[in-house]
Amino acid sequence: RRLAAETFSPTIRKLKSNSARKKHIRRVVKSLASSAVAFVANETMTLEDGNENATCGLGTTSIVVPPRAERARNDAVDGVSLLLFYSARGVPGRLHSKGDAVIKTVLNCLTLCDNKSVNNESTPRDIQLELYRKDVIYKVVSGFMRNIRGHIPTSDNFSAIWNELYSCFDTAIDQVKNECASNYETLLGG
């Protein structure tokens, strides 16, 4: 995984425009999440709550992920987070000149609302699979941030990441506020 990440990261950096780079990174993260969900949807079975093997639960049912699927997911998450890390890292202790754009795009993957697959007619299993997809994205971003933090040991060089984190949290809070407002309006019948 590390060799592949080191090999393909310059390709991401060499994309001509920032929009092409962002689009490619988003596609990589979304593709991983979608393929993980598709694999789990084919491999899993729904069981009643209370089963100690359940790894993702909501309501009265839980999704049990077989060890083989969990291992494949963890390997893929690690590989994608390493690819993104090697795309953003520069000389020891610093980011690459295009690292800020990579960090911003990766953090934006957390806040992108793609709730088309979940609506009022969704079954509990659909909701669980959507939560599983979001968990995969979260794990990719977490692995990426853990690697970046290990690469940049001093707080002086970490300011760009703090700025992006603040922006990401601000966006997430705005999304939650808007979602709550629309849910409130729906409850009032407006």
Image (cartoon, grey):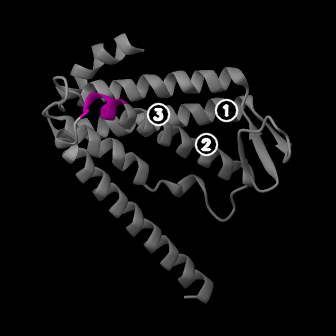
- Element carrying mark 2: helix
Q: Determine whether, in the image, residue 104 is placed left or right of residue 179.
A: left
- Name the residue that disc number 2 marks: 132
Q: Quadrant of the C terminus?
A: bottom right
Q: Nearer the viewer, mark 1 or mark 2?
A: 2
Q: Which residues are magenta?
A: 147-153
Lower position in the chain sequence, tag 3 or tag 1: 3
Lower position in the chain sequence, tag 2 or tag 3: 3
Q: Quadrant of the N terminus?
A: top left
For marks 3 and 1, give the CA distance: 14 Å
- Name the residue that disc number 1 marks: 40
Q: Nearer the viewer, residue 4 or 118?
A: 4
Badge 1: residue crowd in 10 Å (few <14, some 14–19, many ≥20): many
Q: Nearer the viewer, residue 1 or 163?
A: 163
Q: Are marks 2 and 3 in contact (CB under 8 Å)?
A: no
Name, please, the residue furthest toward the front.
154
